[in-house]
């Protein structure tokens, strides 16, 4: 077992330990793992299975069911752009196309789609590395992307 | 004299740059040696003015907005700390038309107070409902909620009091209060604002519900797209517990109540109440068949009150002011007020709490000021992604559950999303099907398969106009199957946006009005 896997294993065990007495805690456990590691590592289901007394298939089913849980390491930067109706009405479709092209091939960036950030009166709404942004335009996006690179 | 400056911490204000503005105000005040007292209030819900900076002068709050970092120095130069004139000056906050003409019962404190300040909450009528509830018999609390006419704000409009009574009358070793804070509908943000800007109100409502039905444990299931709401609610629960509003012997009474905050994981269908309960139990969010009702066999098989954030947030007012005070607002069977949310292509988007019965047109034109792009309105989607599109000439419709139902529309969670005349309604219909395909829990075929077929059919209508007549007929059949054969409203209501788009805008589907009627 290499050190990365060992680290992952200890995070998974810690998470299970922390929520030991909480009924129905699989989601909080998975959140804890993803918030710590950045994604849900491969061995999660098999590690958690004996501790939680759930089958590996059940745990795997939960991990894959929810859009929020990621099974691969995140890119250095994540840009989530809202695709839902209120942002469509403010032009998110063309903006999505633009930003996807702008960042295509840049492995530091992962562009993902999200469905409503609760900023529907000031769209298009986006989230860059966890920061919410309203009134997105292509000029502002270029600036925010540049700022994110500099802050990294 | 120390000046008080209010800069919102609501995430819509933060997304517009409120944090940077706050830092700049602090920096320039320090530089000038001016003593200021910064308060981070909730948002007034006038989002086109965010970041909205307020200053208090002689006990009266004056508003400036939307303030950018670059304009802060200019505001100092204009002596904004003493309400000096400036192009961003909006007048005395309470006198701004948008706010002044609202009927804010649930949102009475929001934007005024600091969300996590227990002192503010108490000062502005907090805990009055809870104290009243502690002095009443559980059945009397339930009666009060019944008499208020309060209906579920999550979409279905089911009377809250009836749900509570069922749970109260059930016998079980444990009962639960669950708050549906999944707020997945595009165009809605009222739940988010309650949680970020007035969290104790929701907590107070939950404790009252717990006392009424005999539940000692509550959960708030918050969507993962709302990290600020998760943080604020978590901190509010901690502070409320410290002050003995939660825990054992609440305020010296015999009641116990605990709250756990749970973060969802990005599944729209988990807003459906039974899928939500599955998710809380740690499973995939698959919809359960009803019966059993959650009120009898809900979370972990126990009797459970599950209510939307806004439903529960209305409860402290009902208890504090009495059922009648609440029921005096509204029309027909829709009693009280609804925090409407104006969104999409709208000039003045934001939160407008009004009694039921206000027309969509009044909301959009008088409050919203028409479109943001200044182009004509083409259609308005009311009630989220499962709500119908209403064409611009049919907006004189009362915002009331029954009035909308009569027109084949729904009120949902009160979201109003405006589109201008550049929108392609076939594209909107296709999106509705795509969203259903993406979010279907997979339990029933009409929803899971039908939605994917729906996307294909609409794509064909778009790309092969000569087939549009036949394909729109097929689309109608498909919608019929989904309407009638789906277990929950995901599959059952996706046809609402699709068919309303097709009915009102046949030309976007490459057919004429005549062909429409022949089909
Ligand atoms: C697909 C789907 C999504 C839903 N999403 C939500 C939601 O995000 N928030 C909510 O309160 N209710 C939502 N509902 C409605 C709930 O099933 C349920 O009616 C509500 O939680 C009951 O609370 P209320 O009576 O206070 O409205 C949804 C329903 C469906 C079918
Ligand atoms: S209608 Fe769709 S979301 Fe609802 S139970 Fe059926 S498959 Fe699941
Ligand atoms: S629809 Fe984009 S933030 Fe709500
Ligand atoms: S997510 Fe279950 S069918 Fe697509």
Image (cartoon, helix red, strand yellow):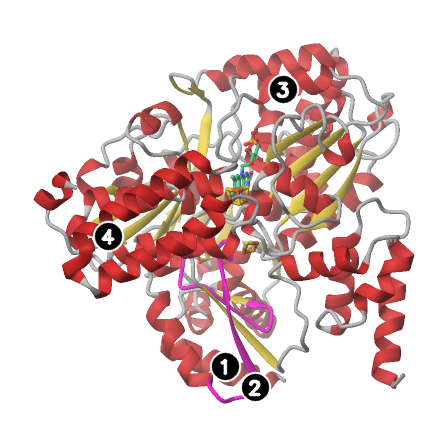
Q: Position of residue B435 (x, y in %)?
A: 44, 55
In-image side of B500 versus B400 (left or right)? left
Q: Which residue is depicted at the point 27% across and 53% down?
A: B419
Residue behind mark 3? B319
Determine which quarter of the picture holds residue A97.
bottom left
Position of residue B446 relative to residue B325, above or below, is below
The Cα–Cα distance between marks 2 and 1, rounded to whole angstroms, is 6 Å
Q: Chain of mark 3?
A: B
Local packing at callout 1 (Cα closer than 10 Å; few below 14, some 14-19, many 20+) is some
Q: Which mark is residue A145?
A: 1
Asked whether mark 1 and ligand 3 are closer than 8 Å, the reply comes as no
Does the magenta-highlighted stretch encompass residue A7? no
| Quarter of the figure that contains the C terminus of chain B | top left
| Label 2 close to label 3 by CB (< 8 Å) | no
Q: Are marks 2 and 1 in contact (CB under 8 Å)?
A: yes
Q: CA distance from mark 2 to mark 3?
A: 52 Å
Q: Position of residue B476 (x, y in %)?
A: 28, 43
The part of the chain drawn in magenta is A104-131
Residue topped by disc 4? B471
Label 4 – label 1 distance at C-alpha: 43 Å
User: Horizontally, is B419 left or right of B126 in the view?
Assistant: left
Image location (x, y in percent) of residue B230: 67, 52
Q: Residue furthest left?
A: B514
Q: Are marks 2 and 3 on the same chain?
A: no
Instruction: Return the x and y of residue B123 as percentages of the image width and height.
Output: 65, 34
Q: Secondary structure at mark 1?
A: helix
Chain of the residue that carries numbered disc 4 in the rendered image: B
Q: What residue is at 43 percent from the left and 74 percent from the top?
A: B70
In the rendered image, the quadrant that contains the N terminus of chain B is bottom right
Q: CA distance from mark 4 to mark 2?
A: 48 Å
């Amino acid at each position: 077992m290499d050190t990365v896997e060992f680290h992952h294993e200890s995070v998974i065990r810690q998470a299970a330990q922390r929520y030991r007495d909480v009924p129905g805690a699989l989601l909080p456990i998975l959140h804890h793992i993803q918030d710590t590691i950045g994604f849900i590592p491969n061995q999660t289901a098999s590690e958690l299975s004996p501790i939680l007394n759930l089958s590996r298939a059940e745990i795997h089913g939960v991990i894959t069911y929810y859009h929020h849980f990621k099974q691969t390491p995140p890119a250095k930067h994540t840009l989530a752009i809202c695709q839902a109706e209120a942002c469509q009405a403010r032009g998110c479709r063309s903006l999505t196309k633009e930003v996807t092209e702008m960042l295509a091939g840049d492995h530091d960036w992962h562009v993902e789609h999200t469905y409503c950030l609760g900023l529907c009166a000031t769209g298009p709404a986006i989230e860059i590395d966890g920061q919410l942004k309203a009134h997105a335009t292509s000029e502002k996006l270029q600036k925010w992307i540049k700022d994110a690179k500099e802050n990294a | 004299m120390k000046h008080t400056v209010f800069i919102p911490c609501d995430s819509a204000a933060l997304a517009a740059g409120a944090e940077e503005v706050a830092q700049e105000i602090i920096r320039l005040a320090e530089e000038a040696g001016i003593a200021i007292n910064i308060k981070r209030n909730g948002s007034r819900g006038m989002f086109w003015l965010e970041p909205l900076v307020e200053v208090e002068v002689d006990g009266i709050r004056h508003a400036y907005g939307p303030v950018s970092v670059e304009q802060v120095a200019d505001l100092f130069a204009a002596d904004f700390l003493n309400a000096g004139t400036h192009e961003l000056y909006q007048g005395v906050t309470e006198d701004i038309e948008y706010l002044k003409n609202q009927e804010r019962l649930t949102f009475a404190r929001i934007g005024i107070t600091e969300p996590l300040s227990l002192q503010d909450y108490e000062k502005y009528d907090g805990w009055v409902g809870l104290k009243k509830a502690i002095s009443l018999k559980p059945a009397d609390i339930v009666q009060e909620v019944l008499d208020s006419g309060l209906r579920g704000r999550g979409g279905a409009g089911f009377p809250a009091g009836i749900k509570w009574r069922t749970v109260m009358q059930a016998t079980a070793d444990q009962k639960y209060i669950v708050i549906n804070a999944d707020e997945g509908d595009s165009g809605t943000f009222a739940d988010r604002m309650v949680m970020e800007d007035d969290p104790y109100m929701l907590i107070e409502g939950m404790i009252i519900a717990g006392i009424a039905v005999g539940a000692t444990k509550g959960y708030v299931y918050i969507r993962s797209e709302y990290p600020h709401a998760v943080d604020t609610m978590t901190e509010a629960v901690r502070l409320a517990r410290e002050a003995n509003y939660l825990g054992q012997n609440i305020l010296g009474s015999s009641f116990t109540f605990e709250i756990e905050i749970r973060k969802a994981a990005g599944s729209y269908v988990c807003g459906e109440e039974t899928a939500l309960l599955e998710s809380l139990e740690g499973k995939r969010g698959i919809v359960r068949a009803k019966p059993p009702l959650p009120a009898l066999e809900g979370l972990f098989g126990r009797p459970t009150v599950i209510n939307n954030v806004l439903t529960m947030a209305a409860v402290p007012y009902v208890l504090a002011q009495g059922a009648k005070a609440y029921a005096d607002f509204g029309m027909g069977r829709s009693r009280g007020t609804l925090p409407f949310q104006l969104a999409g292509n709208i000039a003045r988007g934001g939160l407008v709490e009004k009694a039921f019965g206000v027309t969509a047109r009044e909301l959009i034109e008088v409050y919203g000021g028409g479109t943001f792009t200044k182009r004509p309105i083409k259609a308005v989607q009311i009630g989220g992604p499962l709500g119908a599109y209403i064409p611009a000439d049919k907006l004189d419709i009362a915002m009331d559950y029954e009035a909308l139902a009569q027109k084949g529309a729904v009120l949902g969670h009160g979201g109003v999303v405006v589109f201008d005349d550049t929108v392609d309604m076939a594209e909107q219909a296709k999106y509705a099907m795509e969203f259903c395909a993406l979010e279907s829990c997979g339990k029933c075929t009409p929803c899971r398969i039908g939605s994917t077929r729906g996307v294909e059919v609409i794509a064909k209508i778009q790309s092969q106009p000569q087939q549009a007549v036949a394909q729109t007929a097929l689309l109608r059949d498909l919608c019929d199957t989904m309407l009638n054969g789906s277990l929950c409203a995901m599959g059952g209501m996706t046809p609402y946006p699709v068919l309303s788009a097709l009915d009102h805008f046949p030309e976007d589907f490459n057919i004429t009005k005549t062909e429409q009627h022949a089909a």
